[in-house]
Amino acid sequence: MANENLIEKIMNDPQPIPRKVPDYMRKSGGFMFWTGAMVSAVFLYEVVTGLILLFYYQPSNAYNSTEAFLNTVPFGSIILTTHLYGAYAMIVLVYIHLLRNLFVGAYKKPRQMQWLSGILLLLMTIGVGFFGYSMSGDVLSADATDVGRGISGAVPVIGQYLTSLFFGSGTQLSLFHRLLAWHIVLAALIGIFFLAHFFLAEYNTIMPSGKDSGDRAPAIDRDDGSYKPWYPYNLMYMMQIVLLTLGIVVIIPSILAVMPNVPALFSPFPQVAPNSPLAMNVPAYPPWFLLFIYKELDFQFAQGLGPFYATVIFAGLPLAYLVLLPYLDTKASLKLVDRPITVSLTIVGVVYLAILSAWGALEPGVPINNGIVALFYIVPLVVITGFVMFLTKMIKQGKITNPYIGGIVLSATFAGLSAFGIGAILVYSRMNFTPSVLAGLSILGLFLGISLLFAFALIFGIFPPKARKQEGNISKNTYVAYSSIMGILSIVILIEILSMPFGNIYNQSLYGVGLGVLLLIGGVMIRLYRGQYYGE
Amino acid sequence: MSEKDREETTPPDSSRRNFIKMMGVLAIGAASIGFLRGGIQNIIPSSAPVLTGFPSLKLVDTTGKPISTNSLVVNNPEIVTFDYPLVDEPNFLLRLGDSNNKDVEIKPVTVTIPLTGAKFQSPGGVGPYKSVVASSAICQHLGCVPPEIRYHTFTSSSFDGKIHCDCHGSTYDPFEGFKVVNGPTQRPLPNVIMSHEGSDPDTDSYYVKSLVGPVIYAHTSDLSGGNPLPSTTQTTVTVTKG
């Protein structure tokens, strides 16, 4: 239609909003198309629990009111710990969302604005996490605000104004009042930018699979008439994703809350007050998601530059790269083998981030001389770029035909990182096996085992290509039995958690585990139902 | 006919499918009700006491050293307070003396609450000279706190030897169980019951045990409506300029 106006075009082209999505997005493995949905689910959870916390938080009395919420308010422990772990989950999921879109090339035409709003959302998510983390008023929050003050105060010319803008006039009351205000302001801004980001995603359509787009930008998803309606298919799928994500977010801190000797970095509870004599025993950590900046400030030449310029170089350069990426990498091909530089820089970035974070956790505040810094930056860059270049050349020449080569490289990278982490822990703990060292070793050992298993399974083709079981693999009666067991189980759990006294943190943790299991059961039941009746 | 309608009119096995749907709704409903219990019980503020009884707390200074008799100034013109029994509930700590700043023994007296006519027995002074007393520092008229309400020494121009609130003029007599001297307040200040340990005035220590008299201003009970103190063994005495 020639006289169609712009709004009509946006709303209806290539098909009406909300756009339908292709069926492969709901098939197994399709969850990588829904990482944004997972982030939004956790964000909504954070908003709800955050508003509940707002009823109780007293900036004039930050630490005591947090401790009182934890210990005396019914279900305070479960709300506070899941709010913290929801934030952690949101940050992890935002990174996963970012990496996924980097690898599939979703930053290319026509999604540049979507990409840039996503970068802004990443920054605001880390910012809101920083302010929220600092609000508890414990010794770690005091350390974190000190580092924040140091960085903002070192900004040339306006440093002093920035410091008082973010951290107040210097009294404790104005500090916590401002932390609260910034925490809420940033959360609201995330909400607004999320709506823009989401609308852009609808406008540009989902990023179609390589098969559909022919691996070429601009990749637009068009309904060929075969797409199933949004209701109930997408709604059910989204509910499944939301329930499974929230189930995990609720269960993890509930289990950690009753485990002994959880390291300060991952403890779901606030640490001791900064003026307590015990504060000496808590290492000065920022939140784990800022450990990489914290470690960079320890580099010899960074200390000469001061905290502001060091942050500009170490956090600003990767950021500038991400912002410029849509304008640097403008080639049409979305194939990984045609983008070896983007791919290797992405992997190098992840390796830097992981190693710097682990380094900051193991050697907080230990200065690093320039030689080691140079080695740390150059070795992964050269090794990974060289390896990726070599690999892409081999694939292009047809010497490597394994269709899972991407998965093999990814699992090998994870295996390498885990092995590095185990080595680092063994060296820095000096073989002194305290419970937290053992916990770290066993988690990394698990990662190493799983990623090695995956790599070998892919190399030797243990996952037979395209021979997945079709629907109906469970007989209908077995399925009825499954669902009644889970239905009865959920009633039992519900009675259990409704009749449970909430007197102490242990009971509340059981309540949290029960709630998480209920959410997971709901998610699994939707999965089975979709499999049985939608053939998905 | 849309795909959805087709499925609903010709279900493959409707009773089985409905049963399974019901089980799914049950599980998700259970999760929602579970969430509701926690959420609702959480946001309704508890009016139940946050403490089961009055804690017995040692008075310490900001460095953690116990407050001794000699560290207290007789008729101190500065404002000396400590939080008890909950945070943000300030109390005066006074070492009272005569106009020559000699310790005065404070005897237990019977205090009348003008509003209700009820009577209570004030605890009297403690310490080697029986001259140390304490009371809530929240005015019983409209809840003003120090420095608006404070003890006026014998060198002040007015209200000497009395606790006077600048907000509306309520005046209390610390030598007589903090009884009402002048309105508009209708209630005396709640008295803090204290005990004293040790005989050397340089190393002795003071404990606060409980409250007697009216309930702390704007509270339904002395043990509710706030957050517990960070320590269960001591409370910190702070000194501010009067």
Image (cartoon, coloured by chain):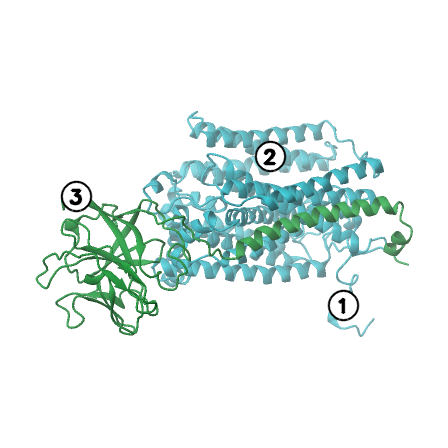
For this view, does A258 lie left or right of residue B187?
right
Camera-near label (1 vs 3) is 3
| Residue A140 higher or lower than B190, as above or below | above
* Residue A490 visible to an observer of this rendering: yes
Q: Residue at x 79, y 61 (%)?
A: A15
Separation of marks 1 and 3 at Cα, in angstroms:
85 Å
Q: Colour of chain B?
A: green
Given the image, what chain letter belongs to the residue carrying mark 1? Answer: A
Given the image, what chain letter belongs to the residue carrying mark 2? Answer: A
For this view, does A373 lie left or right of residue A13?
left
Residue pointed to by mark 3? B203
Residue pointed to by mark 2? A413
Residue pointed to by mark 1? A9
Camera-near label (2 vs 3) is 3
Chain identifier for the cyan-coloured part of the image: A
Residue A33 image position (x, y, % from top left): 70, 48
Q: Residue at x 52, y 42 (%)?
A: A353
In this view, the residue in front, B104 or A379, is: B104
Is disc 2 in the same subunit as disc 3?
no
